[in-house]
């Protein structure tokens, strides 16, 4: 058993704070995503005894932030300057939010006495490294979607201009231009990670068998400050059906459309978010297919809208179909379940299995997406049952702070072991 496995989850030993000038200093590597503001707000709840700094590693001199609304809390650092910045500012830990937010080679250059924490979002497990992801899903795309991807392969390939842009970005960030070398660097970066957390606990089991993975699993969840309906669910809902969470092919839209072709959607409005996640070519094709099949029933979300406006739309949905095989769209899934929606997922996905193990009422696309289940909304007792479980899972402040405090304890113990 290595040192990392021997650390016990105990309450943070505040008596050790004097060793760090009364303040643990944690450097967070982030990217411009919608929930980073909540991450900052969550960490600020322990600002009396920890200092969190937030860095975006980017080759550009200035950042044009689209999603983060607290730019004053974000520092932009060029990849070449990251290691010197880390060493000069005496940070006690590096917290990487999504492994793709930092060039792999930089991770391996972090001094061994600084613990590295990796919070996986999913794409850094299922999509990276290119062509040989860490976690392999046998069938990400179902029949109709796979066929369309194959038929449109040439149209979906990056343009020469985009390839040149990517090449310049790789060179400036210090990453290799060669896919095989980048894969080696990515696995070496994972080998450097000391602590690991992911969206679903079972994802640790999917990666721990890899010989280069040696990290200890921690319980850390992004605390959600969104004003969701956690006390009272308003039922019945409107007859609105959400399909997918983005334009990404992993939503398997075409296969969902094929299933629905044999069902009566009279009175339903179909909500289709297509405002990110795929090329314009793919997005246009999905939108065209949806309009052809659902006619005036379909409402396509094809532009960025504020998150509260988006949740205001899907809050009214009585049913939702998310045909992902990998872990994806958990924010949407939790919100839908918490608000009383009848949710259909692939019974082969780890998300479906995880939710079923929690005792949540969720339905199989393969065996339960029937006319009867579409005609009926989720019953009130089941909706309230789901609401309670999801609340305790993602919005229980006491549990969230306790897990964050345990992480601080691990960092403090790691540092103290290195000093011996």
Image (cartoon, grey):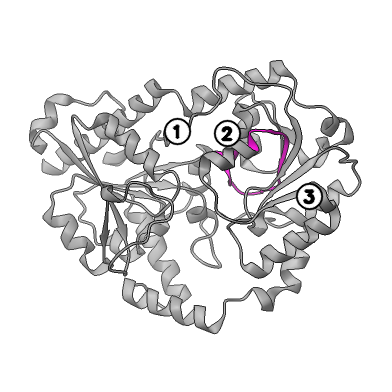
Residue displayed at 45% across by 76% down: 166
Q: Could you say which is closer to the camera, residue 259 or residue 108?
A: 259
Asked if labels 1 and 2 touch by Cβ distance under 8 angstroms, the answer is: yes
Q: Which residue is mark 3?
A: 256
**Cα separation between marks 3 and 2:** 21 Å
Q: How many marks do you count on the picture?
A: 3
Q: What is the x, y in percent for residue 141?
A: 71, 57
Q: Secondary structure at mark 2?
A: helix
Query: Would residue 7 be visible to someone looking at this image?
Result: no
Residue 55 is situated, as x and y percent measured from the top left of the image, at 28, 54
> Circle 3 sits in a helix, a strand or a loop, which is it?
helix
Q: Is 364 left, or right, of 274 in this rendering?
A: right
Magenta highlight range: 314-332
Residue on which the image places disc 1: 224
Secondary structure state at the residue bearing disc 1: loop
State the image coordinates of residue 7 (x, y, percent, origin top left): 28, 33
Give the label, 1 or 3, closer to the camera. 1
Q: Please give the residue where the numbered disc 2 appears in the rendered image.
A: 334
Measured along the vertical axis of the image, is residue 218 above or below residue 133? above
């Amino acid at each position: 058993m290595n040192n990392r496995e021997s650390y016990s989850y105990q309450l943070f030993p505040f008596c050790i704070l004097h060793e760090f000038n009364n303040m643990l200093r944690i450097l967070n590597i982030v990217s411009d995503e919608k929930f980073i503001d909540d991450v900052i707000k969550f960490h600020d709840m322990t600002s009396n005894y920890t200092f969190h700094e937030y860095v975006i590693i980017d080759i550009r001199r200035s950042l044009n932030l689209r999603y983060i609304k607290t730019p004053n809390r974000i520092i932009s650092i060029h990849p070449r300057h990251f290691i010197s910045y880390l060493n000069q500012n005496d940070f006690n830990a590096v917290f990487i939010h999504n492994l793709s937010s930092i060039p792999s080679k930089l991770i391996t250059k972090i001094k061994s006495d600084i613990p590295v924490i990796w919070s996986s979002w999913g794409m850094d497990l299922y999509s990276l490294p290119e062509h040989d992801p860490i976690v392999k899903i046998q069938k990400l795309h179902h029949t109709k979607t796979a066929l369309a991807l194959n038929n449109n392969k040439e149209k979906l390939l990056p343009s020469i201009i985009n390839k040149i842009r990517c090449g310049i970005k790789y060179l400036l960030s210090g990453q290799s231009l060669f896919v095989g070398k980048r894969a080696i660097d990515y696995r070496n970066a994972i080998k450097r990670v000391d602590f690991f957390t992911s969206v679903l606990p079972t994802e640790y089991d999917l990666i721990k068998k890899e010989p280069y993975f040696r990290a200890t699993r921690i319980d850390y969840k992004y605390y959600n400050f969104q004003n969701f309906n956690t006390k009272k669910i308003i039922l019945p809902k409107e007859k609105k059906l959400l399909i997918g969470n983005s334009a990404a092919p992993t939503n398997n839209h075409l296969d969902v459309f094929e299933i629905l072709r044999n069902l009566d959607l009279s009175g339903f409005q179909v909500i289709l978010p297509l405002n990110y996640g795929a090329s314009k070519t793919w997005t246009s094709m999905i939108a065209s297919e949806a309009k052809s099949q659902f006619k005036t029933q379909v409402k396509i979300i094809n532009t960025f809208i504020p998150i509260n406006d988006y949740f205001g739309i899907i809050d009214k949905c009585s049913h939702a179909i998310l045909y992902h095989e990998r872990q994806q769209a958990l924010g949407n899934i939790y919100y839908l379940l918490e608000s009383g929606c009848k949710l259909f997922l692939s019974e082969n996905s780890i998300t479906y299995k995880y939710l079923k193990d929690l005792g949540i009422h969720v339905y199989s696309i393969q065996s339960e997406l029937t006319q009867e289940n579409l005609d009926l909304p989720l019953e009130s007792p089941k909706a309230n049952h789901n609401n309670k479980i999801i609340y305790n899972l993602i919005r229980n402040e006491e549990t969230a702070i306790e897990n964050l405090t345990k992480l601080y304890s691990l960092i403090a113990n790691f540092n103290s072991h290195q000093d011996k």
